[in-house]
Image (cartoon, rainbow, N blue to C red):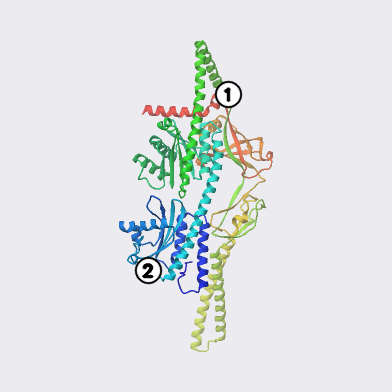
């Protein structure tokens, strides 16, 4: 709803009420948490039409700097892009007003009457209201008014702008109060962050803590940590348990971190790349195209001393925003977090290096006496350990996660588009096959039914009228015979129309019967809170409405096996004639280990939500041994793949990594 001018013909009480209402609206904005720009825009949108003015602007004035335009609506073009002389005169006018600190009315150019002081360079009557924000900063509210405003109205407008200026002061006070509260909360959380940061001296654990706790502390969307060895490598990303180093986004982020680490200068980007080095600009644009972030900051992690600053950084801290960029305070907080993170990472790296130096010192001490004997003893012991790892065998298992589910379960789908009118079952209810579970309503179908019924009723009435006419008009003359013939033909047409309408009505009735959704199997409803989920909700054909499971029948364990483990399971399956044994525990009974048999493996791998490719598997279980069976309960399983050497079982990841590297290295040599 627009703001009506208050300069019309109003009684004093009406004008007072309108002004109070307008000031009340501005006061609500002053007490809100909106940004300065939004507050200025909302104020100008109200006072300009209320004063029937041409336009308005809000300026920010600081000592030893030119006035800055913070917001304007319909301001004269010369104030923004006019000649340098006009801009200079207007800037001097604002500076004089800042020094005086009092509201003022200035007549247009050519109407100053030779009075000393600042001149109005515009063709409008200027209303200026300064608001002191701090000792060095002043905000000026400027309104561009028509020159022919009456003197009494001018004074009223100036008093109104003074009242608005007081609301500006209230807005600034509320801003300062919120800033102080935010700072107090930040320092309290920062103290907790520091205690946790320096409690662990493991580099990777410290990096994870920086990424996750630092993101919460800064309020950003994502925080990443890269450590520098020969090059920067991403070791921690907030809210990410496992980093896929092969993903294109991680590689581009590491390339950007390497570029910033080589320059050893912070990178701040919120939309402009004009001040970046060309190599950094190209790398940054490639990452922005991949990640679609709105703002990014990359800070090298260096210590404060000059020697550390001269060396390469120990790592890089990366802040990302996918929403609108935060306020300027996040920059100072990010620099503070980066400074403390650099100290913590440096301490953890030094501790790790000292551990390796301790082992080296022990070897040096051993070599001082009886070097050959001690060397032989170490070699024999090492060979014995290697032989033992290769000779002795132990049980080899592959771990997977999954869930318990009834073997027979079905989804109930919507047969057509419509709105759920009734939900006839509830969670946990036992139902029979073919039993109605929900009733849909199709508004289009209802309209068609009403239309056909109306046409049918009309046709029947018309047919009855024609029959009455035929009986009453005996064929005694030529005209009567002709009329009787016409009525007979019209009656036949109506009968055919009635037959068609009755067929349509039957088809529509069948469609309405199909809107009653029925259970495809006998079982138990497993979908939670059906009425809240479905009632009065629009659905489309094929949409899943609820799940029905046969909980009193056989159960299975559905596993998601990582695709890299599929090779071992298939090899073990080929070596035995029976199904592989699967041991598992369920969340409802974690202290008991149950067993089942691997029945089936999926023919293709699928990608889960965490970007890990897995192969589905079904395990037959003895469900009568498991208490409190609940559909979807999580389980941790181990697939027994026979006996393997102890060394392979313990160091399988290392062996497979070396094997893969060796194969690719030989392939490159052959090429």
Residue depicted at 52% across the width and 66% down the height: 20
Q: Is residue 558 above or below residue 515?
A: above
Direction from residue 322 to residue 533 in the image, left or right: right
**Which sits in the foreground, 315 or 254?**
315
Count residues near mark 2 (Cα–Cα under 10 Å), then give few for <14, some for 14-19, many for 20+: some
- Can the viewer see residue 49 in this picture? yes
Return the mark for residue 147.
2
Left or right: 327, with 547 as reference point: left
Helix, strand or loop at label 2? It is: loop
Count of residue discs: 2
Q: Residues within 10 Å of mark 1 (few under 14, many from 20)?
A: some
- 621 or 203, nearer to the observer: 203
Asked whether residue 51 appears in the rendered view, the answer is no
Residue at 50% x, 65% y is 22
Report x, y in % for residue 130.
Answer: 44, 58
Q: Position of residue 584 (x, y in %)?
A: 62, 36
The x, y position of residue 529, in whole percent, is 63, 53
Image depth: mark 2 or mark 1 in front: 2
Q: CA distance from mark 2 to mark 1?
A: 100 Å
Q: Which residue is mark 1?
A: 393
Q: Is residue 375 above or below residue 553?
A: above
The earlier-in-sequence mark between 2 and 1 is 2
Residue 574 image position (x, y, % from top left): 54, 31
Q: Seen in the image, is 666 located left or right of residue 619?
A: left
Q: Say which of 470 and 313 sits in front.
A: 313
Q: Secondary structure at mark 1?
A: strand
Residue beneath the point at 54% across and 73% down = 455
| In this view, 56 is above or below 225 | below
């Amino acid at each position: 709803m627009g703001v009506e001018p208050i300069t019309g013909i109003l009684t004093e009480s009406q004008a007072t009420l309108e002004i109070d209402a307008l000031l009340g609206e501005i006061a609500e904005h002053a007490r809100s948490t909106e940004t300065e720009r939004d507050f200025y825009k909302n104020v100008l949108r109200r006072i300009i039409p209320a004063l029937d003015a041409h336009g308005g602007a809000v300026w920010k004035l600081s000592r030893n700097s030119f006035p800055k335009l913070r917001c304007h609506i319909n301001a004269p073009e010369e104030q923004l892009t006019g000649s340098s002389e006009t801009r200079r005169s207007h800037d001097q006018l604002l500076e004089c007003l800042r020094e005086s600190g009092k509201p003022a009315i200035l007549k247009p150019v050519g109407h100053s009457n030779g009075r000393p002081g600042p001149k109005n360079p515009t063709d409008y009557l200027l209303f200026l209201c300064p608001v002191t924000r701090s000792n060095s900063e002043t905000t000026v509210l400027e309104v561009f008014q028509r020159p022919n405003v009456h003197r009494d109205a001018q004074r009223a407008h100036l008093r109104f702008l003074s009242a608005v200026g007081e609301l500006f002061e209230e807005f600034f006070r509320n801003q300062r109060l919120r800033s102080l509260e935010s700072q107090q909360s930040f320092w309290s959380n920062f103290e907790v962050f520091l205690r946790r940061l320096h409690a662990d001296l493991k580099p990777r654990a410290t990096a994870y803590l920086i990424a996750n706790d630092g993101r919460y502390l800064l309020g950003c969307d994502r925080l990443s940590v890269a450590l520098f060895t020969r090059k920067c490598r991403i070791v921690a990303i907030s809210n990410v348990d496992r980093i896929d180093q092969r993903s294109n986004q991680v590689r581009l982020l590491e390339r950007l971190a390497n570029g910033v680490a080589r320059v050893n200068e912070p990178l701040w980007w919120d939309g402009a790349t004009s001040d970046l080095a060309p190599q950094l600009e190209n790398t940054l644009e490639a990452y922005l195209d991949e990640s679609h972030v709105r703002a990014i900051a990359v800070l090298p992690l260096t210590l404060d001393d000059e020697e550390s600053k001269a060396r390469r950084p120990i790592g890089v801290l990366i802040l990302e925003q996918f929403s609108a960029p935060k306020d300027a305070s996040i920059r100072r907080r990010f620099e503070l977090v980066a400074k403390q993170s650099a100290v913590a990472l440096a301490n953890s790296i030094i501790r790790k290096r000292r551990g390796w130096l301790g082992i080296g010192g022990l070897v040096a001490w051993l070599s001082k006496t009886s070097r050959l004997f001690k060397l032989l003893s170490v070699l024999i012991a090492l060979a014995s350990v290697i032989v033992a790892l290769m000779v002795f065998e132990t049980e080899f298992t592959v771990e997977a996660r999954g869930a318990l589910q009834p073997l027979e379960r079905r989804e109930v789908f919507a047969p057509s588009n419509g709105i759920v009118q009734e939900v006839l079952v509830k969670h946990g209810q036992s139902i029979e096959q073919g039993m109605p579970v929900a009733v849909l309503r199709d508004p289009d179908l209802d309209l068609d039914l009403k239309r056909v019924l109306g046409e049918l009723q009309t046709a029947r009435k018309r047919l009855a009228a024609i029959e009455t006419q035929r009986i009453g008009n005996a064929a005694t003359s030529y005209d009567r015979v002709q009329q009787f013939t016409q009525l007979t033909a019209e009656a036949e047409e109506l009968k055919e129309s009635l037959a068609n309408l009755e067929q349509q009505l039957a088809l529509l009735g069948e469609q309405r019967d199909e809107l009653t959704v029925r259970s495809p199997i006998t079982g138990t409803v497993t979908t939670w809170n059906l009425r809240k989920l479905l009632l009065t909700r629009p659905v489309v054909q094929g949409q899943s409405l609820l799940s029905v499971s046969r909980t009193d029948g056989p159960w299975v364990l559905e596993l998601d096996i990582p695709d890299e483990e599929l090779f071992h399971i298939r090899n073990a399956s080929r070596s035995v004639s029976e199904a592989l044994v699967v041991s598992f525990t369920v969340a409802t009974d974690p202290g008991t280990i149950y067993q089942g048999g691997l029945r089936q493996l999926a023919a293709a791998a699928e990608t889960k939500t965490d970007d890990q490719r897995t192969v589905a598997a079904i395990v037959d279980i003895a469900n009568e041994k498991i208490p409190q069976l609940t559909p979807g309960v999580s389980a941790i399983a181990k697939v027994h793949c026979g006996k393997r050497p102890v060394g392979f079982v313990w160091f399988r990841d290392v062996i497979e990594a070396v094997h893969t590297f060796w194969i690719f290295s030989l392939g490159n040599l052959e090429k």
